[in-house]
Image: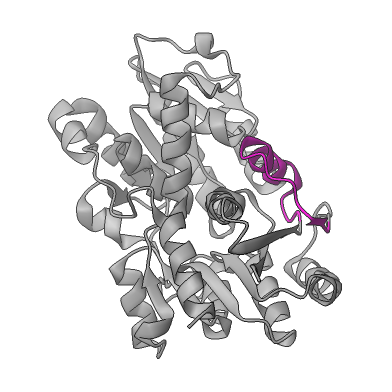
Amino acid sequence: MPIRTLFLFGTRPEAIKLCPVLRHLQASPELFEVKVCVTAQHRQMLDQVLDAFQVKPDVDLDLMLPGQTLFQSSSRMLAALEGVFSDVKPDLAIVQGDTTTTLCGALAAFYARVPIGHVEAGLRTWDMAQPFPEEMNRVLTGRLADIHFAATPWAAENLHREGVSRERTHVTGNSGIDAVLYVRDGLANGTLQSGIDWSFLNPAKRLVVVTAHRRESFGTGFVSICQAVRRLASREDVEIVYPVHPNPNVQDPVNRLLAGLPNVHLIPPLDYIPFVDLMRRAYLLITDSGGVQEEGPSLGKPILVLREKTERPEAVEAGTVKLVGTDENRIVNEAEILLNSPELHAAMGRVHNPYGDGHASARISSAILSFLRK
């Protein structure tokens, strides 16, 4: 009988990294019966990725509420997932990363006595406040999981130090690289279209793409980020595009400090395909996103990370990513080094991605078969 596999996710990053995996499993119906449950923790941004990968959920809990707290979202998810496990009766539950949906999905599977697979396991900052609450979410999910799909050897070693057996740990690469390479190649050969008219961009200027949304930067951190962007925008050779997260803690300082500035384009969040298209046009990426830290090296882009700590140190060690935190002067200084030195920009932007080669989904599939059919 095919292995009934239940994928649980609720946000855009989870969807980006799980859609390639579930589509790979769906291609072998004799081996896998794939069920998909979404919590819609991020409704609109989730739907964008589902459309891009042509994935239709079997269960859509549609649990997002405006302004919901972590207490509210967690309790509602866990209660709703009880019925999902009762109805689907999966052989394996798959979660990804470190979101509230990830933790609640893993805990629900544990309560239902269903084995748990954790995609992108083993990331650590060893600081429960950075990022918050993601670091705790992934640590707890790691304790609940039965099979761990680590993107890199470093992540796998973190799990081994925490007592996870090597037999239950598989270094697969990151499935997000499967996704970004699929979209990059589709845009290049014309099989995919971003649907965005980029004619507003000035080809004579270098494009800096900014994304920032982390909870730990709300308040003074975001003010400092915006002030740094404001200073960079005063350069005549730079054009900035900032897709602004809908959270009011992001919208308020961004609109107050950056709206209407020359050389700054504040745009709504982009669907996944046009965002990859935007990144591949960029000269420099400035971000606090974990996904962009992983994807950017595959596109040959230098990345400045608006965080003091990262659970993805491999790209820092490889030299394609640099941590700059939220200090205004530090952000500006590091950006101007890359803008003023073509040699340093070229060295940092070399195409070298420590997170994978685009074949993580196939390795995850093989590991699942080995785990459940041994």
Q: Quadrant of residue 268?
A: top right
Name the one closer to the observer, 328 or 191: 191
Q: Position of residue 209 (x, y in %)?
A: 44, 31
Magenta range: 40-61
Q: Is residue 316 left or right of residue 28?
A: left
Q: Residue at x 24, y 37 (%)?
A: 349
Q: Is residue 343 magenta?
A: no
Q: Is residue 268 left or right of residue 310?
A: right
Query: How has the structure been colored for display?
Result: one colour
Q: Is residue 48 magenta?
A: yes
Toward the viewer: 88 or 188? 88
**Where 232 sits versus 133, above or below?**
above
Is residue 329 at least partly visible in the picture?
A: no
Q: Is residue 130 left or right of residue 352?
A: right
Question: 154 above or below 304?
Answer: below
The residue shown at (66%, 76%) is: 91
Towards the viewer: 17 or 290: 17
Q: Can I make out residue 144 in this image? A: yes
User: From the viewer's perspective, is 131 left or right of 334?
Assistant: right
Task: Examine the rendered structure and indicate whether residue 14 appears above or below residue 244.
Answer: below
Q: Please state the horizontal and vertical placement of residue 303, each as a whole percent of the image.
A: 34, 42
Residue toward you, 102 or 28: 28
> In x, y percent, where is residue 304?
34, 44
The N terminus appears in which quarter of the rendering? bottom right
Q: Please, which residue is most extreme toward the left here?
A: 343
Furthest toward the bottom, the residue is 163
Q: Residue at x 53, y 85 (%)?
A: 143
